[in-house]
Structure formats: structure tokens, C-alpha cells
Amino acid sequence: MKAEQIYQMVTDRVIEKLKEGVCPWVKPWKGGHEMMATNAISKKEYSFLNQMLLGFSGQYLTFNQAKQLGGSIRKGSKSTPVVFWTTGYSTQEEKEDGSKVQVYHEYDRPILKYYNVFHVRDIDGVDFEAPETEIKLSELEPIAEAERVIEEYASRTSLSVNREYRGGACYRPSDDSVNIPILGQFDMAEEFYSTAFHELVHSTGAKSRLNRDLSGRFGTAKYGREELIAEIGAAFSLARLGMDAQKCFDNSVAYLQSWIKTIQEDPKVVIVAAGRAEKAVNMIFNTEK
């Protein structure tokens, strides 16, 4: 499948969820520290984009991984595609002396590819360990952790974070400052931190950080792309903190329809935005890869 077809496949899946009234970048379960979608063998969490495609939860395997464990895919089970970027491929070649050697061939630029995975509930013949979910919301102290993350990120990057009684929130590149209302102006703490992390994600686009184009004006495609990065980044930030993102993210028809329009106009926007949001959140939480 060509890259353009993969972009379209992902776009179609995201739009399908939006039309069902589901915001695909907001975790569907509430609170706690439930394990997100992971590979059942490596136990590694999938990327932001693949979390959206997989619905944020569950353990998955490829057909070959299930087969290697002695399992089989239950008849009628449906797979889900997960996507990844690759910079090249390896081949086994024979040297003059007859010995074999692995040779890596690098592409001119990263190539988008995909493979299919199955939920472990659709795999027979293998007993899978239940994911560890013993951490409770009360033990996480998400507000204290959110404050720690904000303070540490601001200090590490010399960002100015200003909280004052005001009518809106923004990131201002001219003086590298995030300006947000005070907590008391919000009905719920989750709304305040959703707003705060939305603006913090914008701040990662500064030239001294991830160097995204922040020049888009309201109503332009450029502005919409940056807003999608901030929306995805804020949602995943709250998920990482164990906060209930469902309380504060808008699932109204008008909101979802606006994203359908943006995504339909550019099939690449979801994949690109999810990748950039992941880099932004990793920078904020100081978990850069």
C-alpha cells in the first residue's frame, strides 16, 4: 500500500469515529491509571496516533507474533492497522567468501508503513497476563503532578507561565509566555489543566524548542493544524496525569464537525499532528525519546 493510501486509511478511520460522536484523541475511560494500548510481548505502549486507532486500551499482537506463541486468530476476528515510520530496510547478502551479512538500505526520506494487529481476546491457545492496573487515582495525586510538570518544564525551558484573572488563554511567542486564567475561573480542575497544557503544547513550537510554524492566523489551515496538535497534546497530557479528560473536552456536534472538515481537507493532517503532539508532550514531561 502506498503512503498516500495509508494516510487516507487513517483519515477515514478517524473521521468515522468523529461521525460516531467520539473524539478519537480523548481516552474513553475515566480517571485512574489504566494501561493504554500496548504490545502484549514487549509491553510497550503504542504511539499517540496508534492509541487513537486502537481506542487507548488493550493488548495486541500481530498474526506472526500470535503464531510464534502457539496461538491462532479466532475465525471472524478483525484486525486494526497501526502505522509507523521507517528510514530503510535490511537484506541478507552473500559476501565473496560465501558468508552472509545483513545490509541496511536507507531511504532518501522516512517512509510511512503499517501492519495489522489483533486484540488478545481474539487469540486462542495463549494465556495472556492481565495488565498491571494496581495504581489508583488517589495515589497518583494528578493535580500535584500536573503542577510539578508545569513548574519543571517552565524552569527547564525558561518559559514564563502567568496565571491571572483574565478572559482567555494564549501562548505569546513574542515574549515566550503562556498566559492562562486562574484555577478559580473554571468549573472543574480538569478544564483548567486542559487549557494549561493546550497552551504549553503551543509553547513547544517556539524556535528554541521544536520549531513549528506558529504564524497561522485564526481561520487559516495553518492555524487549524497547530490547534489540532495542541488539542491532541492536551488530551494525552491529561491521560498521562490520570485526569478525566472526558469532563472537559467538547464532544458537541459543531466541534466534531469542525475537525471532520479540517481532516477531510488534508488527509495527512492527523498523522502529522499526532506525531508532533507526541514530541511536544514528551518535551513537556521531559520524556523525550
Image: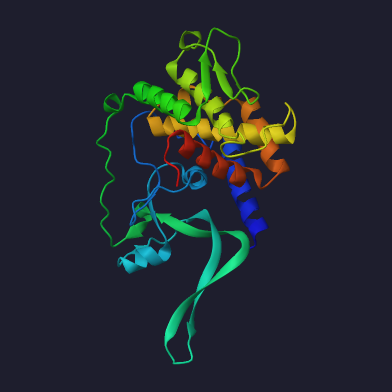
Residue 244 visible (yes or no):
no
Q: How many marks?
A: 0
- Residue at 25% of width from left, 51% of height from top? 129
Q: Is residue 179 above or below residue 227?
A: above
Residue 263 visible (yes or no):
yes
Residue 76: x %, y % from top left: 44, 59
Colour mapping used in the image: rainbow
In front: 9, or 279?
279
In front: 40, or 172?
172
Q: Is residue 275 above or below residue 141?
A: below
Instruction: Name which quarter of the figure residue 85 lies in.
Output: bottom right
Residue 49: x %, y % from top left: 52, 45
* On-image quarter of the N terminus: bottom right
- Residue at 46% of width from left, 8% of height from top? 184
Residue found at the far bottom of this picture: 97
- Residue at 44% of width from left, 80% of height from top? 101
- Residue at 44% of width from left, 25% of height from top? 150
In front: 248, or 166?
166
Instruction: Name which quarter of the figure residue 215 lies in.
Output: top right
Residue 152: x %, y % from top left: 41, 28
> Is 235 left or right of 253, judged from the image as shown?
left
> Is 171 left or right of 239, judged from the image as shown?
right
> Is 172 left or right of 22, judged from the image as shown?
right
